[in-house]
Image (tube, rainbow, N blue to C red):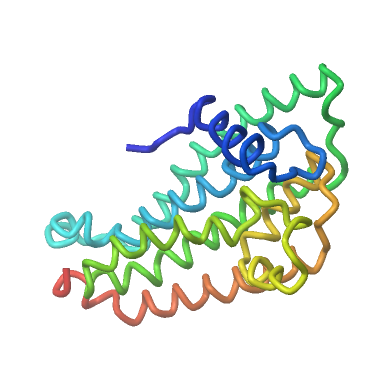
Amino acid sequence: MVYYPTYSFYSNFVIIFGNLAKIPTDGIPPILFYLSGVTIWGIFSESFTKTATVFVDNAALFGKVYFPRIVMPVSIIVSNLLRFFIQLSLFILVYIIYIILGKASLPNAYALLLPLLILLMGMLSLGLGIIFSALTTKYKDLRFLMAFGIQLAMYITPVILPLSTIPKDKQFLFLLNPMTGIIECFRKGFLHTPSFEWYMLGYSFIVTVIILFLGVFIFNKIEKDFVDTV
């Protein structure tokens, strides 16, 4: 089952991180700031975790019917991207309301990069998912550690903390995460955040392509052993 965050979910973010922790959001209304980050990160993490366990979850099917195995992880990414547009519609709706209220500005030219950001997000989750799927077929308990790890990874991505609030000597931890450039570019286009730099997106693109090619290479190497392993 796919979990769709509700309004109360984002309200909790506002209360905990905005009102109690007093974490600034670059002058952006907190609900918009958190909604933009969770919209991107939530679909990425969902796509990654489901792809990483696709062969274990469908072992019986693979043993009975032959078809190109790569179809399964790709289909997960495609279906989750369709769900992403539902979440994106929620963000756009709230965004339009804040524009009408005069508390948000119209999108700028960076918003035109949205199709590229969606493509990078899908490619990155597919590549990482395929790599980890090879591991979970042999080490099934890894799926539990992986689920915990992806939750921790959110805190070294500017989902909750604006990059501008991170000390300079700690920012490299966030910048090493290829999702940082994707999220920052998305916010730059719609929310005019000041932290985005072009090198972030360039880094995200290069790392995503490398991870995807590495994932496909590993997949092709061990595909024949999947059924025997799971």
Taking the image as shown, residue 76 lies to the left or right of residue 161, namely left
Q: Residue at x 62, y 28 (%)?
A: 89
Residue 21: image location, x then y, percent: 63, 43
**Going by the picture, which residue comes out furthest to the bottom?**
221
In this rendering, the count of numbered labels is 0
Give above or below for 219 relative to 108: below
**Going by the picture, which residue comes out furthest to the front?**
20
Residue 113: image location, x then y, percent: 76, 49
Q: Residue at x 62, y 49 (%)?
A: 159
Q: Which residue is drawn at 49% across and 27% down?
A: 6
Give above or below for 51 relative to 168: above
Give the camera-side residue of 152 and 56: 152
Residue 76: image location, x then y, percent: 40, 49
Position of the C terminus, as image quadrant, is bottom left
Q: Residue at x 51, y 61 (%)?
A: 153
Taking the image as shown, residue 36 lies to the left or right of residue 54, namely right
Give above or below for 72 relative to 95: below
Position of the N terminus, as image quadrant, is top left
Give the camera-side residue of 215 and 71: 215
Residue 142: image location, x then y, percent: 28, 68
